[in-house]
Image (tube, rainbow, N blue to C red):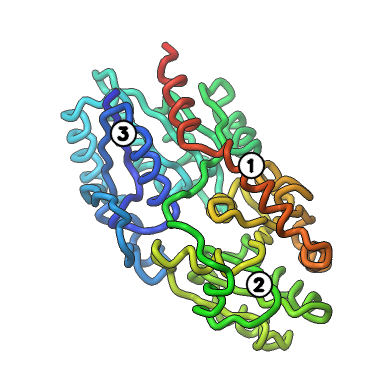
Amino acid sequence: MKIVIIGTAYPLRGGIAHYNALLANQLSKHHTVETITFKRQYPRLLFPGKTQQESGEPDHTTPAPQLLDSINPFNWILVANDIRKRKPDLLIFKYWLPFFGLCFGTIAKMAKRKTKTRVLLICDNVIPHERRPGDVTFTKYLFRHADYFIVQSDTVEKDLKAIRPKARYKKVPHPVYNMFGRAIDKQEARSILGLRAAGVVLFFGYIRAYKGLHVLLDAASKFIRTLDIHTLVVGEFYDHEEKYRKQIRGLGLDRHVTINADYVPNEKVGIYFSAADVVVLPYISATQSGIAQIAYNFDKPVIATDVGGLGEVVRDNITGFLVPPNDPDALADGILRFFAEKKEAAFIANVQKEKQKYTWEAMEAAIEQLVAYK
């Protein structure tokens, strides 16, 4: 097949860009693949981060042409016409936010007109965690022009069926992010980061209210009374940073919490995961999380809240622990149990087995099977 992927891609940064790069790499083994990315992904007013550009090494990823402007309808027409000239068999969009519904939907509609091109959506979300007016309308508009769907959790599958009851889709687990290099020795990583505690838990990724960092901080105030555990928080704040800093001071956690509020380039991600004993996902709500797939890449157990699709990835008492959401006591108990019962070695062995099912080959096979339907 001739395939065009539209979405975030290098030189833009973030988990979606990483996903699209790995997807393109897998599909290109058996198909002709091109990627088109944004010249403007978000208006500056709507982007809470520091920059939308990747600051690290590209990991041998070829920069995608930056053609698409997410807020300019005239540009959407130009991009759609460009795609029509390329004559792809399949147009793939990675969909995670209704903000892009009008843009992606218009391009899909026009690219399909009087062509054999079909459209596939890989859905991280159908309706996002932080809802806004127009979310359902924009999502329905895009979904009307899609032929196939990939969902990656039961939660997203349910949401898809609510909007497109007769959707042609497959459910495929989110593959492991395997683009961040190898793990290094734990003590070496801790030395680099200046960590001296007996245990280290890692919170990684963009910090938004629904990801529950405030719950982890409340839990930290409890588990440090029993064990010497350091909480390592790594990620840009897409929420009000000062409220978390104030919480840390108020709980007396200044010596027990380290925050790196910068975006971490690809080549340095492994240092933080290598330093940790366990990765913690204290989400209030979720569909799935790419952070769990990064953790598995580095053979790290995960303690997560049992929300959305997290319980499908984190197998309770096998690859980590599941705890109720928004419950600092339960989260603290789970973290203390992990260390007290010395679960790390057994969980690591189970993670190494479990992650074998989260492959890009499975994603490619699902896409091929969908498109084979007539």
Q: Which residue type carries mark 2? A: Val
Q: Quadrant of the C terminus?
A: top left
Please tell me which residue is depicted at 53% across the width and 51% down the height of the picture: 297
Front position in the image: 165 or 210: 210
Q: In the rendered structure, which disc, 2 or 1, sits on the residue that comes first in sequence?
A: 2
Determine contact: label 3, label 2, CB under 8 Å: no
Work out how far the residue at label 3 is from the one at label 1, CA to CA, in angstroms. 27 Å
The location of residue 118, given as percent across then percent down, is 35, 23
Determine contact: label 2, label 1, CB under 8 Å: no
Of badges 3 and 1, nearer the viewer stands: 1
Q: Which residue is mark 2?
A: 200
Q: Which residue is mark 3?
A: 28
Q: Which mark is residue 195?
A: none
Q: Which residue type carries mark 1? A: Lys
Front position in the image: 2 or 26: 26
- Compared with 269, 242 (above or below) is below
Quarter of the rendering containing residue 278: bottom right
- Compared with 215, 210 (above or below) is above
The location of residue 239, given as percent across then percent down, is 54, 70
Work out how far the residue at label 3 is from the one at label 2, CA to CA, in angstroms. 39 Å
Q: Which residue is mark 1?
A: 353
Of badges 2 and 1, nearer the viewer stands: 1
Work out how far the residue at label 2 is from the one at label 1, CA to CA, in angstroms. 23 Å
Quarter of the rendering containing residue 242: bottom right
